[in-house]
């Protein structure tokens, strides 16, 4: 089976995010009010082939822990859907 | 004994030749080690140089940490031999788990390229034992976008308790003023040691401060110290 995988990688909540802060300061300057808590992360997408969803999830999870995210500074969430 | 320094070259390394030049300037032999090499026999010191290994794609040092040479570097370090990661090399060592913590985007979101002052925090390592004094202020250049050292509170306490912070950013008097921290590193950390004290990671470039024609000579103290640490005691 083939699955579409999406891994969302975000700086961990307790870590300051200078990129997010800079975006947050810029938004009101160009007319967007009421925006706060901006954080900048990244989204990694790929296709994974595995016997079933559980196997696919385990591949994506371990790939995320080992390479796609750095657990010292980042958290990740993954989404999986059958293709 | 003329030591041989192995300078690892990843695709995208760009300070490998500087590292090579500076160690040869100090009289050592050198050998470039391509990132696919695994035979480190005859090498006495390993340098992971600065640059942008594997383009620094995904995160700085992330892909380089899994290159074939790094398994050999891990064994080399486990055998107690000295390993220095400079700038990108520091990032690689953290990603490879040889040093704790991570290097993040500079707090000011700017690439910082300038000489900085570093305070020597411990003499208990092959990189600092030969010819420095505690609290000595060195002038060594930095050149990086992702040099903000981060580790959680628990790790920082451990680094402090075990005196594993090698260098901290300071002013010319050795004070840890906010202005002297060029990148927002926690505790002003510029360089740290592993628990066994034979692996050093640092953002500043000692290899750019060896030849008096460019960048001063304070880097010599560090590089010469490593070479000195390899010499057998005179009998």
Image (spheres, coloured by chain):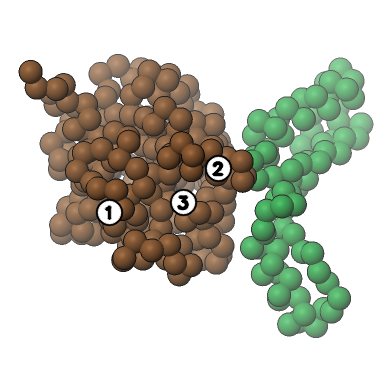
Chain colours: A green, B brown
- x and y percent of residue B197 in the render? 39, 31
Residue pictured at 15% horizontal, 57% vertical: B212
Q: Residues within 10 Å of mark 1 (few under 14, many from 20)?
A: some
SS label for mark 2: helix
State the mark number for residue B157.
Answer: 2
Is residue B92 positioned above or below A56 on the image?
Answer: below
The N terminus of chain B lies in quadrant: top left
- x and y percent of residue B137 in the render? 29, 57
Is residue A71 positioned above or below B214 on the image?
Answer: above
Q: Residues within 10 Å of mark 2 (few under 14, many from 20)?
A: few
Q: Residues within 10 Å of mark 3 (few under 14, many from 20)?
A: many
State the mark number for residue B136.
Answer: 1
N-terminal of the two: label 1 or label 3? 1
- Residue B14 visible within the image: no
SS label for mark 1: loop
Residue pictured at 75% horizontal, 52% vertical: A13
The C terminus of chain B lies in quadrant: top left
Residue pictured at 71% horizontal, 52% vertical: A14
The chain identifier of the residue carrying mark 1 reads B
- x and y percent of residue B25 in the render? 15, 43
Give the labeled residue for mark 3. Answer: B189
- Residue B213 visible within the image: yes
| Image position of A34 (left or right of B93) | right
């Amino acid at each position: 089976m083939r699955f579409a995988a999406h891994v969302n990688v975000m700086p961990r909540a307790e870590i300051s995010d200078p990129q997010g802060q800079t975006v947050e300061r810029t938004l009101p300057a160009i007319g967007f009010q009421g925006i706060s808590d901006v954080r900048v992360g990244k989204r990694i997408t790929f296709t994974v082939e595995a016997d079933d969803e559980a196997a696919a999830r385990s591949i994506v999870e371990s790939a995320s822990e080992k390479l796609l995210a750095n657990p010292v500074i980042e958290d990740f969430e993954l989404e999986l859907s059958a293709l | 004994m003329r030591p041989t320094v192995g300078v690892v070259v990843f695709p995208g390394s760009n300070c490998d030749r500087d590292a090579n030049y500076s160690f040869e300037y100090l009289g050592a032999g050198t050998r470039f080690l391509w990132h696919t090499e695994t035979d480190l026999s005859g090498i006495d010191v390993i340098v992971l140089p600065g640059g942008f290994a594997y383009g620094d794609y995904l995160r700085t040092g992330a892909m380089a940490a899994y290159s074939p040479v790094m398994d050999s570097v891990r064994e080399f370090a486990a055998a107690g031999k000295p390993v220095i990661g400079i700038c990108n090399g520091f990032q690689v060592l953290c990603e490879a788990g040889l040093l704790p913590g991570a290097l993040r985007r500079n707090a000011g979101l700017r690439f910082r390229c300038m000489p900085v002052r570093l305070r020597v925090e411990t003499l208990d390592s092959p990189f600092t034992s030969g010819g420095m004094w505690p609290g000595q202020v060195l002038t060594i250049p930095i050149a990086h976008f992702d040099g903000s050292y981060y580790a959680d509170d628990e790790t920082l306490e451990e680094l402090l308790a075990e005196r594993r912070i090698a260098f901290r950013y300071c002013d010319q008097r050795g004070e840890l003023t906010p202005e002297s921290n060029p990148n927002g590193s926690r505790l002003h950390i510029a360089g740290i040691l592993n628990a066994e004290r034979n692996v050093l990671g640092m953002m500043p470039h000692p290899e750019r401060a060896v030849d008096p024609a460019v960048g001063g000579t304070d880097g010599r103290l560090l590089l010469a110290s490593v070479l000195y640490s390899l010499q057998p005691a005179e009998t």
